[in-house]
Image: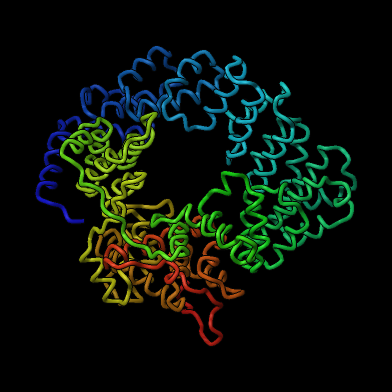
């Protein structure tokens, strides 16, 4: 992105005004952070006076107060909260305190603090609040119980907040027992048996002991069980089949086909169990998946079951199954761009009356350059992917207002001190969570420009992506390190747009990015991958520490991407999948019928890799439009994914 001299001077002035702090206080803050991470509360408290008046004093107060929440008087905690007013750290501390107050059943202080919790995005806190709203008759108990169940079912792990509220509503009769059993099913299916046992234990602790045995050996339970007359026994049998499906799918299918269960289980229980087994098969790309689904009714299946039924239908070319699965989805799921697009495709494939008009209407409802299915819908309407008109430049007044925002100033100061995780939280809170009313497009563009001007590319992109109508693609798709990326990509036969699309997804151009599994740098290269690739391309003097250097990271990352692209005969979706999940997996996923690239991509079994490939390819298409100035096609990049050629053998070292 080109930056004018005026813009650069403004950024320098901002750094001088907003970032300048006493060096001693800066050093104390960094020391405090280290002490906090080491749980040295005494050292944190001793350093606190050194940062009085610093722009990051709210952060320091958070570090000092968090360890004291268990023992400090409420008045002391509130005094510190008032000193942190309107900052992310005030809301973060209040969130922590609310969780503790709920756990300790201190409902008086909980109710006093909850209205001041601006983010209000913690499901446990929400569940506690719903329970108290029902008790005080601020919300009808039935409505509060339903909302609690929705949040409880979304929790991945066992918790206190939603479980406590659920127990209260179960005991009062406002939540049916079926809600607890559904929580158990969802948890067991997600391989979270502890959460399942917690839910069942709310109904009866003895039943939880039976479920514990089921989690350990579902086959033994099913072999011993002959009858399922009582509702709880039917539910336990259903749980056992779900669990067995994760361990031995063929055995689970054979068990569910036994007459004892087809007769004794309800239609809902049978349908849910078949949906679970169908999902397992679909994720394994098993051609029998649709046959399993056919044994149940769509209306009883979960959102994930239906999504995978639709994917299995695409893969098999069974468009009626695709249409029916999408039709059975709830309104929110059905309105997601992915299912709007595939609903339109299914209508076209089935050639139903008025299908062309209905499909065009559906495509038009999501078509834009902004995402994977939005781009595909645009192409279905005969429109190529092009860069939208640039919005009016940010005015000096708009820029000053953004520069003077206290949250932005705190975030910039945190970045300057190397407190990246803290800076990102403060920035995101400022642009997305602090205000009850969303920031305007102009405010967001101004804040994004500050990030761009300071080479905070991840904040630049993510902030600009929040605009509703004014889309600045130079902010959304920046091109830092342009000479290095283009020269390297072109020298080895890679499209620079593809490289940029991948880097944007991997690291958002954060050179120092580190993943939880050890990947490093702009292109998030794993150490073992770096060593192997360096040998492959003749970097004989490569040292592991060099992967953190920008140019070396680009050199090795692009080389690995090129090796993947060549290994998969130029298929961009498969190469992107290999970059994310390793080459062995897409080699397996390509087995079976030849598939349009978008169908193959939608059937990637891993949620992370599926989303990754979509993002990289959509990014690539937009970068190509930006770099060339010409309209582009996503579909051309997706191509057709076919089984490996019979005479070709993959590089045995490329694993």
**Residue 153 appears at what percent x and percent y?**
62, 38
* Left or right: residue 438 compared with residue 137: left
Q: Tell me: residue 411, above or below residue 291.
A: above
Near-viewer residue (515 or 404): 404
Q: Tell me: residue 417, above or below residue 344.
A: above
Quarter-of-image position of residue 402? top left
* Left or right: residue 302 compared with residue 618: right
Q: Tell me: residue 14, above or below residue 125.
A: below
Residue 557 visible to the viewer: no
**Residue 586 appears at what percent x and percent y?**
52, 69
Number of numbered callouts drawn = 0
For this orientation, the residue located farthest to the bottom is 647
- How is colour applied across the structure in the image? rainbow
Near-viewer residue (1 or 440): 440
**Residue 291 appears at what percent x and percent y?**
74, 63
* Left or right: residue 79 compared with residue 132: left
* Left or right: residue 271 compared with residue 369: right
Q: Residue at x 46, y 29 (%)?
A: 120
Quarter-of-image position of residue 185? top right
Q: Residue at x 75, y 37 (%)?
A: 209
**Residue 567 appears at what percent x and percent y?**
45, 77
- Dividing the image into 4 quarters, which one contains the N terminus? bottom left
Residue 174 visible to the viewer: yes
Quarter-of-image position of residue 576? bottom left
Q: Residue at x 30, y 19 (%)?
A: 83
Near-viewer residue (322 or 549): 322
């Amino acid at each position: 992105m080109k930056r004018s001299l005026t813009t650069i001077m403004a950024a320098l002035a901002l750094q001088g005004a907003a970032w300048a702090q006493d060096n001693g206080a800066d050093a104390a803050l960094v020391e405090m952070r280290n002490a906090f991470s080491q749980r040295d509360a005494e050292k944190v408290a001793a350093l606190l006076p050194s940062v009085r008046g610093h722009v990051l004093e709210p952060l320091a107060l958070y570090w000092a107060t968090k360890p004291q929440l268990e023992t400090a008087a409420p008045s002391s905690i509130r005094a510190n909260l008032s000193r942190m007013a309107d900052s992310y750290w005030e809301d973060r501390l209040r969130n922590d305190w609310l969780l503790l107050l709920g756990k300790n059943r201190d409902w008086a202080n909980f109710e006093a603090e909850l209205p001041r919790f601006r983010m209000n995005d913690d499901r446990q806190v929400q569940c506690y609040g719903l329970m108290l709203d029902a008790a005080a008759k601020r919300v009808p108990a039935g409505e509060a119980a339903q909302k609690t169940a929705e949040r409880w079912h979304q929790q991945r792990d066992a918790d206190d907040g939603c479980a406590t509220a659920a127990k209260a509503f179960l005991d009062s009769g406002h939540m049916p027992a079926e809600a607890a059993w559904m929580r158990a099913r969802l948890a067991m299916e997600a391989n979270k048996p502890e959460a399942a046992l917690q839910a069942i234990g709310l109904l009866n602790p003895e039943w939880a002991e039976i479920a514990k045995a089921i989690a350990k050996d579902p086959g033994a339970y099913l072999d011993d069980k002959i009858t399922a007359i009582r509702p709880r026994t039917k539910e336990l049998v259903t749980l056992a089949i779900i669990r067995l499906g994760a361990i031995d799918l063929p055995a689970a299918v054979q068990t569910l086909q036994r007459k004892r269960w087809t007769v004794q289980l309800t239609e809902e229980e049978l349908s849910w169990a078949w949906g679970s087994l169908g999902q397992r098969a679909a994720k394994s790309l098993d051609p029998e998946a649709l046959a399993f689904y056919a044994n149940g009714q769509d209306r009883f299946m979960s959102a994930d079951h239906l999504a995978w039924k639709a994917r299995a239908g695409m893969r098999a070319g069974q468009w009626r199954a695709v249409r029916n699965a999408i039709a059975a989805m709830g309104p929110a799921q059905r309105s997601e761009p992915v299912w709007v697009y595939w609903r339109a495709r299914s209508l076209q494939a089935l050639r139903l009356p008025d299908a062309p008009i209905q499909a065009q209407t559906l495509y038009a409802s999501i078509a834009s350059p902004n995402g994977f299915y939005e781009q595909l819908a645009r192409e279905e309407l005969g429109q190529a992917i092009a860069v939208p008109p640039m919005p009016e430049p940010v005015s000096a007044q708009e820029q000053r207002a953004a520069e003077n925002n206290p949250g932005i100033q705190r975030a910039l100061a945190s970045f300057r001190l190397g407190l990246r995780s803290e800076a990102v939280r403060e920035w995101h809170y400022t642009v997305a969570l602090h205000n009850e009313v969303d920031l305007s497009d102009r405010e967001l563009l101004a804040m994004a420009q500050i990030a761009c001007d300071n080479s905070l590319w991840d904040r630049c992109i993510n902030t600009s992506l929040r605009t509703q109508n004014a889309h600045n693609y130079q902010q959304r798709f920046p091109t830092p390190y342009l000479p290095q990326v283009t020269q390297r990509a072109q020298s080895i036969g890679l499209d620079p747009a593809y490289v940029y699309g991948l880097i944007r997804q991997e690291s958002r151009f954060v050179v120092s990015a580190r993943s939880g599994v050890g990947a490093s740098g702009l292109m998030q290269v794993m150490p073992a991958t770096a060593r192997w690739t360096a040998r492959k391309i003749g970097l004989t003097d490569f040292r592991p520490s060099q992967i953190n250097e920008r140019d070396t990271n680009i050199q090795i990352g692009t080389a690995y991407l090129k090796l993947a692209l060549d290994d998969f005969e130029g298929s961009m979706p498969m190469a992107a999948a290999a970059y994310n999940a390793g080459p062995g997996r897409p080699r397996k996923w390509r087995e079976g019928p030849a598939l349009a690239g978008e169908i193959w991509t939608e059937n990637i079994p891993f949620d992370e890799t599926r989303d990754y490939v979509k993002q990289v390819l959509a990014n690539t298409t937009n970068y190509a439009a930006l770099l060339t100035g010409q309209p582009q096609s996503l579909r051309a990049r997706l191509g057709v994914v076919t089984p490996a050629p019979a005479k070709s053998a993959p590089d045995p070292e490329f694993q």
